[in-house]
Image (cartoon, coloured by chain):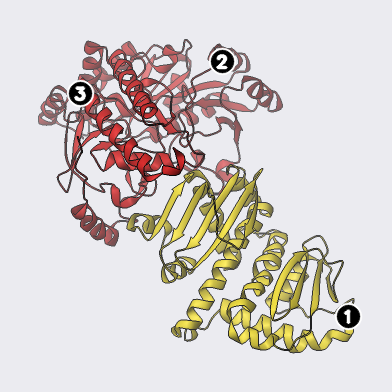
Amino acid sequence: MKDPITLTDSKTMAYINMYAVLGTLENLCEIDPVASAILSNQKPISVGFDVAGGPKATLYFKNGRCRMEQGCTDCDVKLPFSSCEKFNGLIDGTVTPIPSKGFQHIKFLLKVFTPLTDRLSALMRPDPEDLKDREFFETSTKLMFYTISVALSQIANNDEIGKFSAHLIPDGEISFAIKDCVAATIRVKDHRLVTLKQKCEKPRAAMEFDNLDLARDLFDGKVNAVACIGEGTITMKGMINMIDNLNRILDRVAIYLA
Amino acid sequence: MSFPIYEHKVSRELFDRATKVIPSGVYGHLGPAEGNFIPVCDWPLFGDKAKGAYFWDVDGNKYIDYMCAYGPNVLGYCDKDVDAAAIAQSKLGNCTTSPSRITVDFAELMVDTVNCADWAFFAKNGNDVTTAAIMTARAATHRKKIIFVNGFYHGVSPWTQKIDYPGVIPEDVANNLYVDWNDFEALEKLVAENEGEIAAFISTPYMHGNYRDNETPAAGYWQKVRELCTRKGIVLIVDDVRCGFRLDLAGSDHYYGFEADLICFCKAIANGWNVSCLCGKESLKGAVSSLSYTGSYWLSSVPFAAGMACINKMKEIDAPKLFREKGLMLTNGLKDAAANNGFDLVVSGEPALFYLRIANDDSMMLHQEWVAECVKRGIFFSSHHNHFINAAMSDKDINLTLEVADEAFKVVAANHPELF
């Protein structure tokens, strides 16, 4: 289903919700003490998300960490969704899923998974008052960075306008980073993008934000990237046509995640 | 010798003021983002004055300017003959209710100069006349679709942009079709797939897009395109805004041995005085006359006087020959300097509008470093765009450029011992 004004579609949104939003649980569990506490003493368990006509992925929780993998054939709990819209409803909080497998783990869903996603929501859609706490602000902004980094690839591969931008990006790796803080690699091959949540070792192009505060302002739409380049607070180098088209996809990220 | 390294304190102060009152400080192609000022600290952001082949920035640094204001500087900044003609006309009037008689003189000069021209239609910027050309083609053919060459740039109106650009809606570009440069078979196929629906094929005379080696037309390409367009009733539009008068005063279509139906001029037409011109064949004069298309300053007479002086002077000095010779002297010297320092400098496009790329890495980062080292020493190159030669550029300027380029190569080599 496509929104006639923004031209966003529910399938792309589902891919973003799966890999960029739920996928950020990986980073939440790694950097947020509150999330770590929620996971303490938790036995290994996996939760699969099976979206008809959309993405399929599994979250593995083990030793206080979380990782996401594609596919959901091997999971302890499976949550089926009849459509992308239904899955998007889970993220919006309007749909309550019913497991098709692993009813015995319902306690995990209610007592661990739901508090984790609530914590993620608190950090991703924060109360302005909470952002006055520097530690909260930093955690929130880092998580937002990872979400956006992954959303870039999902939009490039699924959204019609995103695909147009991607078809103009040559092969190679783009370094996407906040200076001395967090980094991601956007790998491009045959105009399909994959985000790796790790520093890029051999970029063909690089875009770097000077600091977390600037990145936050940019993510929140308070400053403009073109102006920041002139001010020197965003640096770019290498194949600028890669960056240029990535920035056009970044515009779409803001629309999807608004 | 070692060249002094420029600093940009005043530029930065001015830019900081600018960002408060001008969107992004300097917007567009002259600004640090679109201009690919990498790193931004090495580049001047505002100019103070310009003369001949040079401009001085607000910090007093002097540059030999190979961007020529992205083309308009064709005879040298503040050319005395062109400016004298403009000043003389300004004493008679400029933007007046009844257009000056010089409008007719200038149109006659354009028709006499440009090979395919039976008429001349004046405006201000390149975008004005590329848009006029598209509207004319649609008015004449009653068709919607336009074929573009991938990597194109024809201005800034929504029809020239892409679906993912801010402010552009899908309907703006719904009738745009795309084909690769020099691929006649693909063009022929696209025309067949859209039989009877193509209003125009628009292209620059050769591929001088950014971020890529520039490509001149394959043997016979333009002749085949011309024949196809004639056979299918497609208006052949040459966007000569960038190349116009630098390759051939009769138009770049003439240079490559074919005739456009419509041809667009701007940059080199009046040495910086603001005027653009669409020229075309008699068969399209009725269509262009039918357009509801005008502008407050389009018939200002001062730029017309400047344009006449500029074109006449370019004829006197055989400017295209001079540009080619100077372009070859420079680019051959740059290639030698690069090779002497272990770099592979690829030069592409026409010598009058040469494009440079260091090919030792696949990221352009070495190239950007080298360009920045040149700019810091007073040679204004660009890392992403073709360059321009102007008639005021002397052999001494070129030789100085080669000395600076050599030093810049040495600096980059020293910074990258892993490569050598």
State the residue at coordinates (25%, 47%): B44
Residue underneath mark 2: B221
Disc 2: which chain?
B
Q: Looking at the picture, does residue B330 appear above or below residue B27?
A: above
Side (left or right) of A187 relative to B293:
right
Q: Residues within 10 Å of mark 2 (few under 14, many from 20)?
A: some
* Camera-nearest label, 3 or 1: 1
Q: Residues within 10 Å of mark 3 (few under 14, many from 20)?
A: some
* Chain painted in yellow in the figure: A
Instruction: Give the mark, 3 or 2, whose residue is nearer the N terminus.
Output: 2
Q: Colour of chain B?
A: red
Residue underneath mark 1: A102
Q: Where is residue B174 drawn, in percent x and y?
A: 60, 41
Side (left or right) of A1 relative to B150:
right
Q: Looking at the picture, does residue A137 appear above or below residue B375?
A: below
Instruction: Quote the CA–CA distance across marks 3 and 2.
Output: 34 Å
State the residue at coordinates (30%, 19%): B329
The amino acid marked with disc number 3 is Ala
Residue underneath mark 3: B392
